[in-house]
Image (cartoon, rainbow, N blue to C red):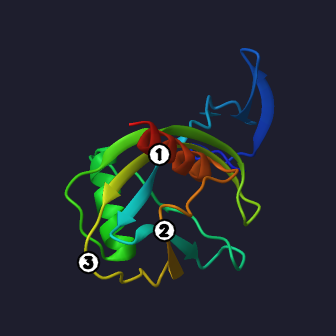
Amino acid sequence: MKYCPACRATLEIADLDGEERLLCSDRCGFVHWDNPTPVVAVVVETQTGVVLAHNKNWPAGAFSIITGFLEKGETPEQCALRETQEELGLQASKAEFIGFELFNGKGFSGELFNQLIMGFHLRADGEIYLDEQELDEYKIIPLDKLKGWDSATGRIVQRWLDIRDNG
């Protein structure tokens, strides 16, 4: 964010109560608090394993679990079910909470993110039909081959595996 959404003046980094914040240079009072964006990440389990997908904007070979932004008036559980249906064409009736992770860093595109990622697991049925606006490839990893990786979504996967293995 470079400009004040209230008065269009340039935003500048300044100290506010001991924290660096973006403040309006014209002093209209606007403060960009940079609160985390709520995102749902879904471990989608099928009869043959867990679905990982490739986003068209990611480097070749980069796969992850399904993610999506929480929409107004939607619960995180509803978001998990909706994103699974929208992105993979799969149906599920119940999503179980795994845990959350904070992602405050750069994505594949170099863009900075500040997200609260809420992880869910669900079992889905049907034939996979990718949302071709976002995704261009998927693979199914058998449960005995699945392991977490070093990212917020990878830690969600590992947490699910730990819960699954330890009952």
| In the image, residue 77 above or below residue 48 | above
Instruction: Characterize the local packing of mark 1: few (<14), some (14-19) or many (20 or more) Cα atoms within 10 angstroms.
Output: many
Residue located 64% across and 45% down the image: 4
Quadrant for the C terminus in the image: top left
Residue 123, position in %: x, y? Answer: 30, 60
Disc 3 marks which residue? 126
Residue found at x 57% / y 52%: 153
Q: Position of residue 71 (x, y in %)?
A: 35, 52
Q: Secondary structure at mark 1?
A: helix
Q: Earlier in the sequence, mark 2 or mark 3?
A: 3
The three-letter amino acid code for the residue at tag 2 is Pro
Q: Which residue is mark 1?
A: 160
Which tag, 2 or 1, sits closer to the chain's start?
A: 2
The label shown at residue 142 is: 2
Which residue sits at x=51%, y=77%? 139
Mark 2 neighbour class, 10 Å CA radius: few under 14, some 14 to 19, many 20 or more: some
Q: Is residue 49 above or below residue 139?
A: above
Q: In what element is the residue under mark 2?
A: loop
Instruction: Tell which of 107 and 125 is nearer to you.
Output: 125
Quarter of the view holding residue 75: top left
CB contact under 8 Å: marks 2 and 3 = no
